Image (cartoon, rainbow, N blue to C red):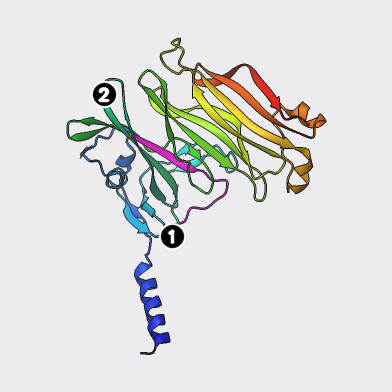
Amino acid sequence: MNLTKSLLFSFLFITVCNAQDIVLKNVSDTILNPKRTLKTADPLDAVKTMQQLFPGKLYNLSDHNTFISWNCKSCKPAAFTDVNGVEGDQLFPYEQGVATRLLANIDYVDSKGNQFKILAFNHSVHDEDGLQTGRFSGGLLGITKFAKNGTTWEMRSFQPAVTAFGAFAQCPKPKLLQIGEDQFAFTLLHVNGGAGGAYEGYLYLVAGFDGKYQPVMEVPAYQLTNSASLKWSGSYTVVDDGTKKHFRDIVIKTKGSFDKAAKAEDDFEVSPPEEIAAMAKTKKSFNFEIERRFSFKGKFYKMIDKPIVRFSNIK
């Protein structure tokens, strides 16, 4: 066999070996029961635990693309909000089948030394090539919580689906945030935008409330990228002043810049936050900081007081 034939044979062999027919495994509708129980030995294997919760067929493709492919013919789909608001609610489980991926494996300890583990999942519509597609389709977030009891992890709560965030069916990774005395929630930075345009980021807070995890705060104008004339990014701080045991106030600071001359480089016009709109009409460039305070009112965080706006390098 000459070198050319040898290389061709090797390429075909590798291609055939790597190719996988991704099929859907039918599962029982009992997997979506939020009252399910599960115990697993320490150390907890997150991928194996995910497969116990969603017992479909596990695939390990290239580029760390690991997911479970499953279908539930006996399940009754329910509507879940997609924060993109473009294609409407997501009906889960999907009629075309589901691909479930491990999104995050989060550990934390409360003030009494109790150990907990949160596993977050990303659900997307089954794709025969193992892809995640759809610019304005978010990844559907699922959450389960475990508590450590000796050498065993016991599942304390299981919520297969919460809300869809992100783009291209990929939910952003949740980050742990303590918002009260032994009260923990998650922040998610949802970013999306049209092709060639600016990408605007919203900050969401997901917390346990009324017996389930749900979004309890939405902060618009938290981040903006892919724009030459306007840029901004946000940060958040939980106010621990001793006045609130749970659902403490959250301060959002957004820092950015404006450059009127750079508008010519933008393919699409970007509207500035209302707090700096008047300044943007009269000045050529400046830096800014917007401070907003959010307080939990009833079932949701709402902005209180007037935003504090600071300007610098005004020209």
- Where residue 217 appears, as percent x and y from the top left, is 52, 26
Which amino acid, by three-letter code, is at mark 2?
A: Gly
Residue 5 visible (yes or no): yes
- Where residue 226 appears, as percent x and y from the top left, is 65, 45
Residue 173 in the magenta stretch? The answer is no
Q: Is residue 23 above or below residue 156?
A: below
Q: CA distance from mark 2 to mark 1?
A: 45 Å
Quadrant of image for the N terminus: bottom left
Residue holding disc 1: 128
Q: Is residue 38 above or below residue 238?
A: below
Q: Tell me the SS state at disc 2.
A: loop
Q: Residues within 10 Å of mark 2 (few under 14, many from 20)?
A: few
Q: Residues within 10 Å of mark 1 (few under 14, many from 20)?
A: few
Q: Is residue 197 above or below residue 174?
A: below
Residue 275 visible (yes or no): no
Q: Which residues are magenta?
A: 130-144
Sequence order check: which comes first, mark 2 or mark 1? 2
Which amino acid, by three-letter code, is at mark 1?
A: Glu
- Where residue 282 appears, as percent x and y from the top left, is 82, 29
Tell me, for residue 113, which label it has, or none.
Answer: 2
Front-most of 188 and 262?
A: 262
Instruction: Tell me what residue is drawn at x 36 percent, y 51 percent.
Output: 70
156 with respect to 232 (left or right) = left
